[in-house]
Image: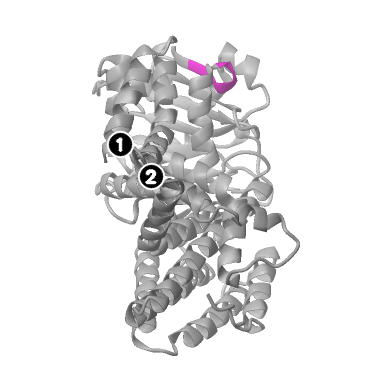
Amino acid sequence: MLAGLAAGLLTWLIARAWPDLPVERATVASVAFIPIWTLLALALVTWRRHAQPGSGRRRLFAIHRGLGGALALAAMLIFGSGVGAVLDRALARWQVVHAAASEVPSVDAQPLDAVLAGLLAAQPALVRSELSIHPAGPDHPWIEVVYFGPTREPVRVDFDPITGAKVAEGRGPLWVVRDLHRHLLTQPLIGEAVLGLLGVALALILCTGLATRRDWLRNLARRRRPAGPLAMRMHQWVGFFTLPAALVWAWSGALLGLTLVVVPIVGGGAYGGDRVALMRDVLATDRPPLVDTAVERPNLQRALAARCPVVDAHLADAEVHQLRVRHPGLASGTVRVDLEGDGLLERGSFTRGADGALRDCRALPAAGPGLQAFMASIVLHYGEWGPAWLVDLAYVLLGAGLVALSWLGGVLLARRRERDGEARAAERLRRWLAGLGYGLPLAIATLLLLSRVPALARAESLALRMFVAVLVLALLLARTFSRAPALLHGALVVLLAAVPIAGWLVAGVAPGPVEVVLVVLAVALVGLRRRPVAPA
C-alpha cells in the first residue's frame, strides 16, 4: 500500500511535468503507473539497511510463495476465464446456429439505416440512448447491434446483412466467461476494481518468481537433469516462457481495472481535473448534454462515406469496426465511426454531429508515443490485432499455460504444507485445485453444449445459471468426495464428446474444425494417465 501511494504521487508528477501535450502527459503517466507501483513494491520489500547478503532474495521468495499460494486459485480463475473470453470472440460464428448469410455484402451495401430505423420505431426510447452497430463481416455474417436496456443490461440483436430483417436476440453462451473475466459477473465498478488489484498482485508474483532460486535459470539450459521435483521444474519452465505475456496482461489488466484510481490521478495532473476533456482526447468519447429537440435521423451510409483527411492519409485500408450512434434523431446526436486494421496501431475514428459537421478526426499512427503506448497496451490485452486466427491461437495457448503455471504453484504449495506437517491443509488445497481445475473446463464445455441447441443458444439467464451451477457443483464434489477428480475427469470427457454429437443431431450442424478439436481433446483425456511426481 505504501508503494501504491508513492506510485500515485510519481504518476501525478509525470502527468503534471512531462514536456508534451496534456493527452501525452496523461497517457504516459497512465502506462507508467502500474509498473512503477510494482517496482517500488519490490524495492521496498528487498531494501534493508545493513542487510546480510542474499536476504533480499529470500524476502522476494517469501513474497512469491506466500502471495502466490494465497492467489493460486484466483490466478487459475482469471487466466482460465481469459481463455474463455478469447474463445467467445474466436467462436462467435460457431456459437450461432441460425442460418447466416452465405455472402456478406460490403459495408456500403448493408442496410444499416434500415436497421436503425426499425429499432427506433420499435423502441422510441433509444433516441435518448447510445447504440453500437457492428457491420457484418466474414467472421460474423450478421449486423450486430448492442444497446443498454431499461435495466442497464446490454442487449444484443442480430440482423440479416442483406434484408435487414431481425435474425436473433441475445448473446452466445460464452458471454458468461467473458464477463467473468472482465468484472467477475458483478457490478463493473466492483469487479473491475478487484481484478485491478489482483493484476498488481499477480505482477508481483511473476516478478518475484525470478528470485526463487539463484541457479534455476542456469538449470534450464543444462543438459543434465537438475535436482528437484518434476513439478518444480515444470513450474519454472512454464513460468520462464510465459512471463513476458503474463506480465503484459497483468499490468494492462490492472490499468483497465483501476480506472477509478488512474483517471483522477492523471486527469488532475494533466487536465486540472477536467475528466470530460481527458476522455475526449484519449478515448474520443464526446458526450454532450441531451438536447431534446427532434432533428432528422442520421444517415449512417452518408456518415461512412464522409471520412476525414487524417484517416484517409494514415488508415486508407482500415475497415469499419463499429458505429457508435448517440441520441439518434435529436439535436445532440453524434455518429462515431471506428476503424481498425491488422496492425497493432492501425486504429482511428471520426465523429460527426447531427448537423453533419466533423467533430473529431484521429488516426493512431499520427498520434504521439504516449497515446500509442496506451492504446497498444489495451489492444495487446484484448488480442484484437494481427491475423485473428493466429493471435487467438497464441492467446489460448499462453492462457492455458498460465493456468497450468498457477495449478503447479498450488501443487508445490500443497507439497510444502504436507512436508511441514500440515497434512489436512495440504489435502484441502489439493481438493480445491482439483475442483477448480476440472470445474472451469466443465462449465465452459456446458456452455458449448448449450450453443448447439437452437432453443437455448441465446438464453442468457440459463447460460449464467448453468455455468455457476456446474462450477459450484464441481467444487463441492472435490471438497466432499475423495474420488471426485476421477468422476469430474470422466464427466469432462463425456461433455466434450457430446458437443459435436448434439450439434449434428439437434441443430443439423456438420462437424467442422472446432468439433475435431473437441473430439481430440476428449480422446487425449481418455488416454491421460497420472504419472508419479518425483519426491521433494
Sequence-first tag of 2 and 1: 1
Q: Specify few, some or many for label 1: CA neighbours under 10 Å numbering under 14, 14-19, or 20 or more.
A: some
Residue 516 in which image quadrant: bottom right
Tell me the residue that label 1 is attached to.
4
Is label 1 in a helix, a strand or a loop?
helix
The residue depicted at 25 percent of the width and 20 percent of the height is 293
Asked if the magenta segment contains residue 363, the reply would be yes
Q: Position of residue 114 (x, y in %)?
A: 48, 36
Q: CA distance from mark 2 to mark 1?
A: 10 Å
- Seen from the viewer's position, the closer of residues 37 and 351 is 37
Asked if residue 417 is positioned above or below residue 105 in the image, the reply reads below
The residue depicted at 35 percent of the width and 25 percent of the height is 11
Asked if residue 332 is positioned above or below residue 508 in the image, the reply reads above
The answer to whether 96 appears left or right of 149 in the picture is: right
Q: Position of residue 7 (x, y in %)?
A: 33, 31
Tell me the residue that label 2 is attached to.
200
Q: Specify few, some or many for label 2: CA neighbours under 10 Å numbering under 14, 14-19, or 20 or more.
A: many
Q: Which quarter of the image is occupied by the N terminus?
A: top left
Q: Amino acid at mark 1?
A: Gly
Q: Which residues are magenta?
A: 361-366
Is label 2 in a helix, a strand or a loop?
helix
The answer to whether 169 appears left or right of 232 in the picture is: left
Q: Amino acid at mark 2?
A: Val
The residue depicted at 27 percent of the width and 18 percent of the height is 274
Q: Is residue 59 visible?
A: yes
